[in-house]
Amino acid sequence: MNKGILVVVSGFSGAGKGTVMKELMRRYDNYALSVSVTTRAPRPGEEDGREYFFRTKEEFEQLVREDALIEYAGYVDNYYGTPRSYVEQKLEEGKDVILEIEIQGAMKVKEKNPETLLVFVTPPTVEELKRRLEGRGTEKADVIASRLSRAAEEAEGMDAYDYILINDDLDECVERMHALIQSEHFRMSRNTEFINRIKEESKAFNK
Ligand code: ADP
Ligand code: 5GP
């Protein structure tokens, strides 16, 4: 069995990453979405262990000391990190594992695992980004301002990603995400075992 693909999805806060991921997971069962640990407070409707593992700063620092996180980063006054064991287990099972993380964490993951597929999700315009962030209604004005300012910084790093996905029509964005991850399975460099076997077997036809 081939190992799954590690996919990192980043994008400005309010771009719709969470919405796209939820829909992708609902439609297809070959993905495993990593649940991160965070020190931020849960939003209304968020559940511990579903959207995030909500932990104190001390508990988070303990996980860092235990090397239990693949990567972690600070984002607007809080820490966020990816638990290692789930990701490794699901990749081994052949699932495509998706990390929905910000850009610093994305770069760390890519550095450690060069085969990681990096996807950047944006809204069609920055006006729409502001509208979505305000419309979500989960942050106060000062936090929204910090997140928009962070978006400006993150925009500078977008070029490091493999693909850009514009989340205008949700349905289209979800299907494109699925299509591009699935195409990635057929990349030559991900099929070396099969390629070597075919090469070897074809030698039988040599005259
Ligand atoms: P992120 O996870 O990137 O911070 P969310 O998934 O929370 O963003 O989406 C931010 C807001 O935008 C939510 O209120 C969500 O319902 C809305 N949204 C997401 N995708 C779309 C879309 N394609 N069109 C319109 N609104 C969207
Ligand atoms: P939010 O508070 O809106 O859920 O997330 C804020 C930012 O943190 C988003 O850009 C999100 O992708 C990112 N994030 C979530 N989990 C992780 C993680 O485990 N590691 C890193 N580096 N970023 C994360």
Image (tube, rainbow, N blue to C red):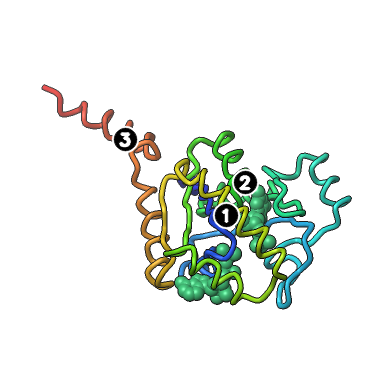
Residue 152, given in percent of the width and then of the height, sits at 56, 52
Residue 17 visible in image: yes
Image disc number at residue 88 = 2
Q: In which quarter of the image is residue 136?
A: bottom right
Nearer the observer, 10 or 3:
10
Task: Report crowding for label 3: few under 14, some 14 to 19, many 20 or more residues within 10 A (C-alpha).
Answer: few
Q: Name the residue under label 1.
A: 151
Residue 95, given in percent of the width and then of the height, sits at 52, 54
Identify the element where label 1 is drawn. Answer: helix
Looking at the image, which residue is at 59% across and 69% down?
133
Residue 86 visible in image: no
Q: Earlier in the sequence, mark 3 or mark 1?
A: 1
Which of label 3 and label 2 is nearer to you?
A: 2
Which of label 2 and label 1 is nearer to you?
A: 1
Q: Which amino acid does label 2 sit on?
A: Glu
Q: Is mark 2 within 8 Å of ligand 2?
A: no
Q: In which quarter of the image is residue 191?
A: top left
Tell whether label 1 touches label 3 (CB within 8 Å): no
Lateral position of residue 139 relative to residue 154, left or right: right
Nearer the observer, 72 or 157:
157
Residue 142, given in percent of the width and then of the height, sits at 72, 64
The quarter of the rendering in which ligand 2 is drawn is bottom right
Report the Cα–Cα distance between label 3 and label 1.
42 Å
Task: Report crowding for label 1: few under 14, some 14 to 19, many 20 or more residues within 10 A (C-alpha).
Answer: some
Q: Mark 3 points at which residue?
A: 195
Quick check: 3 above or below 35? above
Nearer the observer, 62 or 160:
160
Report the Cα–Cα distance between label 3 and label 2.
25 Å
Report the Cα–Cα distance between label 2 and label 1.
30 Å
Identify the element where label 2 is drawn. Answer: helix
Tell whether label 2 touches label 3 (CB within 8 Å): no
